[in-house]
Image (tube, rainbow, N blue to C red):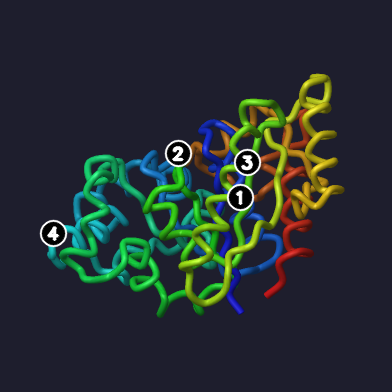
Amino acid sequence: MTQVISIINLKGGVGKTTITVAVAEFLAVEHQKRVLVIDLDPQTNSTVALIGEEEWAKRNQNSQTLHALFKDHIDDTYTFEMEKSIVRKASNLRGGLENLHVLPSSLDFVKIQDRLINIWQTALIRPYDVLKNAVKSHLDDYDYVLIDCPPNLGIVTQNGLNISHWYLIPTIPDHLSTYGIPQIISSVKNFNRKKEGGEVKLLGVVASLYRSSVNRHNNTLDRLAAKVQSGELPRLFETRVPLASKAADATYYDVNGINTLKQKYGNSTENLYGSFQSLTEELLTYVQI
């Protein structure tokens, strides 16, 4: 059974996209899984990291992004085609990975954010059902679907949650980044009341951009661990993704000649490669197809 995981945090800059892209690549390469990344974030970082700016610009111009899907439902037009919009052989590893695909986002999402609530008036469907209706016949083609959600809990994020079995919260282990976790959990619980086909469950919290030498990071992790013990959180992942200079390089698509994950994420003292390898293996123990 396909497992769909939304990656969410209300705060930007917490490593959400880096984790999405890395886990997708590790699932595809080291575990030979069929993976689809759905980029719902208007910043389009996952998209550009997996297909590059040039390919994204071409597809954006040809209405082959999720912006076109939502805009069609607002304007009662028919420009978006799912088959043509899924990018196959994504990633700059080995010139593209056969089993890693991406459904691109668009910067133009920002232009229609305020109009999304009007979808039900033109399309006669619930605003949070748009993505579900579009992808439902394609999900069985994949083992894992990872959804990079925008840093809010609006209609676009709800579309991701509506097709998800799980949601994952990456966070820098500090006060500001973890502050919104209770709000995320509460909002998802409320959304589950109207979700059909089973609730979306919290998979856990992943510490990212972690620095072992910073006391506030370790103190925050202790507090999160206490919440797990009290039952407020289901899980704090044992893997901690370090703050590493290599992380920014790894999301830069226009680097040629990368054939291995170790080339892409290794060669640094922070052991980013080992962290993502461990994180992916840990995720697989909790979410099995």
Q: Label 4 neighbourhood size at 10 Å, few (<14), some (14-19), many (20+)?
A: some
Callout 4: SS:
helix
Label 1 amino acid?
Ile
Callout 3: SS:
helix
Cα separation between marks 2 and 3: 34 Å
Q: Is residue 213 above or below residue 131?
A: above
Tags 4 and 2 touching, CB below 8 Å? no
Q: Position of residue 194 (x, y in %)?
A: 46, 67
Callout 1: SS:
helix
* Residue with the mark numbered 1: 185
Label 4 amino acid?
Asp
Disc on the earlier residue, 1 or 2: 1
* Numbered label attached to residue 75: 4
Q: Position of residue 101 (x, y in %)?
A: 47, 62
Disc on the earlier residue, 1 or 4: 4
Mark 1 or mark 2, which is nearer to you? 1
Q: Position of residue 26 (x, y in %)?
A: 66, 55
For image coordinates 69% across by 28% down, the residue present is: 243
Mark 4 or mark 2, which is nearer to you? 4
* Residue with the mark numbered 2: 254
* Residue with the mark numbered 3: 181
Q: Quadrant of the C terminus?
A: bottom right
Depth check, front residue: 69 or 113: 113
Cα separation between marks 1 and 2: 37 Å
Q: Quarter-wise, where is residue 146 in the image? A: bottom right
Label 3 amino acid?
Ile
